[in-house]
Amino acid sequence: MRRLSSITLLLLSQSLQAGVTPAPVVDLPKPDSWQFTFQARVRGEYRDNVYDFNDAKKSVTDDSWLLHRIRLGIEWQPLDWLHVTAQGQDVRESFSDRADVPLQQGAEGDDAFDLRLASLEFGYPKRMSFKFGRQILSYGDERLVGPLEWLNFSRTFDAAKLHYQEENWWVDGFVSSVVRIHESHFNVSDFSDTQNPRHQIFSGIYFSSSIVPIQETDLYALHLHEESIQGATDFVTYGSRMKGDPLKLKGWDYTLELVGQAGQLQGKNLRAYAFHLESGYNWLQSAWKPRLGLEYSHGSGDGNTADNKVNTFQNLFPTNHPPYGFMDTFSWQNMHNLVLRLAAQPHAKVKTTMDLHGFWLADTGDAWYRANGTTQVRKITPGASNYAGAEADFTVNTKLSKHLDMLVGYSHFFAGAYLHDTGTGDDADFAYLMLTLNY
């Protein structure tokens, strides 16, 4: 059985190697079996200029801090067709100058022991099952829907999900609402928060198949509904994803994902699109298993924010770390991102990556959006250059023992002309060391 507590290691390793994303199913234990899970993770971070790109200003975000979390879980299968999961989580931020309030000034903050997972799964995941309760939703390369495990508190949903699977294809249908992190009280979603006027409902159908032998082929339609004083949000995100298998392509791999959006965003007409292109070569017979890849991602922007139309792509609930750089300066909207990636495995327990990103705004009449999809780096300046800058990322992922993993990384952002045109344009740095203990 794949333990829920090993999700962190799985997501980190996905960024360090190529391969086909497996169907989101797990083997269940034998009936009437119990399994307890435990995770302790600690990460030290150093950031300088990442938020303001200004050497002359000493901000509370130009600092170093310690992020730590503990997860305790249980999985129980009283019957061969019933699987029970529950997991609690405690997350903390220490030694930082900024307030330890989640999502304020980039903080991960404190969230005292709370409920992360609580679900019942009826049926057989390798055939047909229904899962209800607090759970993880993860699809494709997580560019639209994922748990964002890099964050201390990560992301879960209160959801109902129906899964059906055949030998070479599977399909999910779900209805959900994302769980909101609250520092001082129990974390709830809009499903269970009757006082919240947002009334968020996120639903969708996701189909994946291996009918084309050399690739994984996905089709999906995702619907988001929210209410606000600005107006109702109701739009559909529809797309397709094709991911080549290097084992069947003599070392070559590729990914093509095409996405469109249509509907209403806070009362305005939404028409937007995004796409991702990627190709790489894997030296499968080499001892170091190196991979060299080239990627290009584009999310549409909006050159006129004053009309009744929105053309900025909405990034939904993604894992934007690390597709667009480990410094989390970009999301999949109003952007061009060109990436050169090199990965290697110099030892059976050591994986390394080196990525070089180039960033441009798709339209300077729109904002530069950070990884959360809402925070803007600078005020909109239509006359500025659209070249935002370049980022170099270096990571080393090491398995120190059966249960202990270490991730070390350093990133540098080379400020581009857009930053100079809109204010200060100093380079930024980010360094971190993370230890994860899983049982």
Image (spheres, helix red, strand yellow):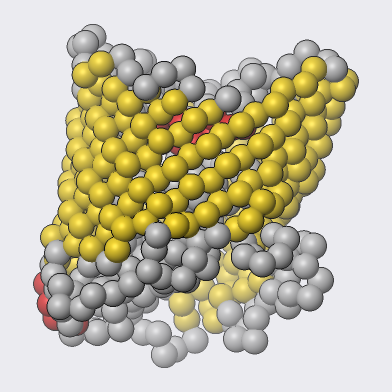
Residue depicted at x 70% and y 26%: 36
The reply, left or right, for residue 430 in relation to residue 111 is: left
Say above or below: 270 vs 37. below
Q: Nearer the viewer, residue 403 or 11?
A: 403
Q: Nearer the viewer, residue 195 or 308?
A: 195
Residue depicted at x 37% and y 22%: 400
Residue depicted at x 80% and y 17%: 33
Say above or below: 413 vs 230. above
Quarter where residue 287 is shown: top left
Q: Quadrant of the N terminus?
A: top right
Q: Position of residue 66 (x, y in %)?
A: 40, 52
Say above or below: 421 vs 25. below
Q: Position of residue 170 (x, y in %)?
A: 64, 30
Count up the numbered dots. 0
The answer, for residue 300, to whether it is visible in the render is no
Q: Quadrant of the C terminus?
A: top right
Q: Position of residue 433 (x, y in %)?
A: 32, 42
Q: Nearer the viewer, residue 139 or 181?
A: 181
